Image (spheres, rainbow, N blue to C red):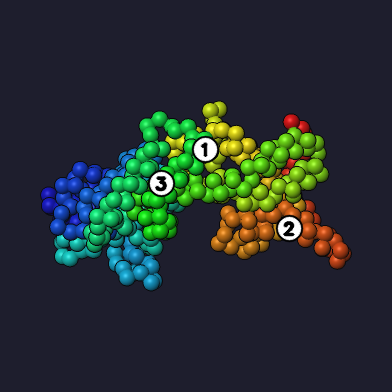
Amino acid sequence: MQQKTYPEIIFNCFASMDIKRLQFYLKNEYSYQDTTKEFFLNEVERIFEEHKKAGDTELLIYEGKCAGVVCEHCNKSGFRFVGNHSRNYLDLIFIMHDDDIKDIFNCSVFKTTEYHEELQYKASIDINTDDQITFNKTPEYLANVNAATAAYEELMTNQPRILSYHDMCYWLDKHAFTIKNIANGDFINSLMRWGMFTNLYEKFRDFREYLSVYENTFTKANHDYKLVAEEKDLITWMLEYETMFSKAPYYFRFGIMNNGEGYTSEHIDSIIFTGALFTEGFSFITTYQKHHLVVLNKYGIYNADEIPEIIGHEEYDYAINPVYSLKFHLEKRVEAAGLGVQIPFNLNGYIEEDLNSREYKP
């Protein structure tokens, strides 16, 4: 029986998702994706666990190369590892010299040399900037990391934290100094160990700014909605509060659920938002969201082929994209009618029953 080479052993370890053998065989003297073997394999283990949860028992191997034209590693060889059940995958480049593996790193633009079946979700090995071997961990940096970690752990406890608007504002004010010390409050440094803290702080900061502007309007909007009896009333209501809806932060608008105790977000773990202001705000957003696309699908002036061109890169910025504005579409319809042009309704498959099946009464 022919003995396997060192690279073959490593490839087989990836294919079998054997993290213990990788920890044994990968050499400590090399860095992998600009970090230590320990940090690199922590990320690999996380991806292996995701594959196993998805039902994979092995990763299928496909040869390929980096296809990034502007990438310094373009044309360097590697493998695509594909889950045998989930079809989720990971692309890795291996830098080798003779029978030694000098480096391994994630590839974002990878092309295989043979066709394989449809893929699902692509995994990525994400290394924090401050986990790279060249990063200088100064005393100031360590103090900021410790402060950010402590602040984050105040809210992210074992049991879900019940958080009111007042509690959120208190936490923001308490840790404003830490944010200022971290790149002067510049959130571009989220790929650092303090990233979980700065990301959470940014979301809560946006929540506070939004809620503080409209705190006296949410209750009126929710009350006015109870008076809606038919489509024309609904449209009047939507036009009146369109700006308030469009200004809502992304994470305030999407992924919000009422769990009985309060509101939770699929984007913010272990937090239950409670209290009158959160309740009124989230109630308004969920109500408006329920009707928004239904009405737009009826009165929108663009077809499905035109919409992506108009949306561009600001896909979810409702305050910028006119494609999301009911007022914009209705005004354009009036302008077109004045020129003798009648724009058809339901350009994108709107079904009449979607809007009229609900009686607009409390």
Residue type beneath disc 2: Phe
239 w.r.t. 106: above or below: above
Q: Earlier in the sequence, mark 2 or mark 1?
A: 1
Lateral position of residue 176 relative to residue 28, left or right: right
Name which of mark 3 and mark 2 comes first in the sequence: 3
Q: Which residue is mark 2?
A: 328
The numbered dot on residue 175 is 3
Residue at left 25%, top 50%?
Answer: 39
Q: The residue under label 3 is which amino acid type? A: His
**Image quadrant in which you'd find residue 358:** top right
Q: Residue at x 56, y 33 (%)?
A: 275
Please report the residue visible at 86 percent of the width from the left and 66 percent of the height from the top. Answer: 339
Asked if residue 335 is positioned above or below residue 48 in the image, the reply reads below
Secondary structure under tag 3 reads loop
Neighbour tally class for label 2: few under 14, some 14-19, many 20 plus, Cα within 10 Å: some
User: CA–CA distance between discs 2 and 1?
Assistant: 36 Å
Q: Is residue 99 visible?
A: yes
- Give the camera-side residue of 91 and 342: 342
| Side of 200 relative to 92 (left or right) | right
Q: Label 3 to label 1, Cα distance in Å?
A: 14 Å
- Dot 1, crowdedness within 10 Å: few (<14), some or many (≥20)? few
Disc 1: which residue: 166
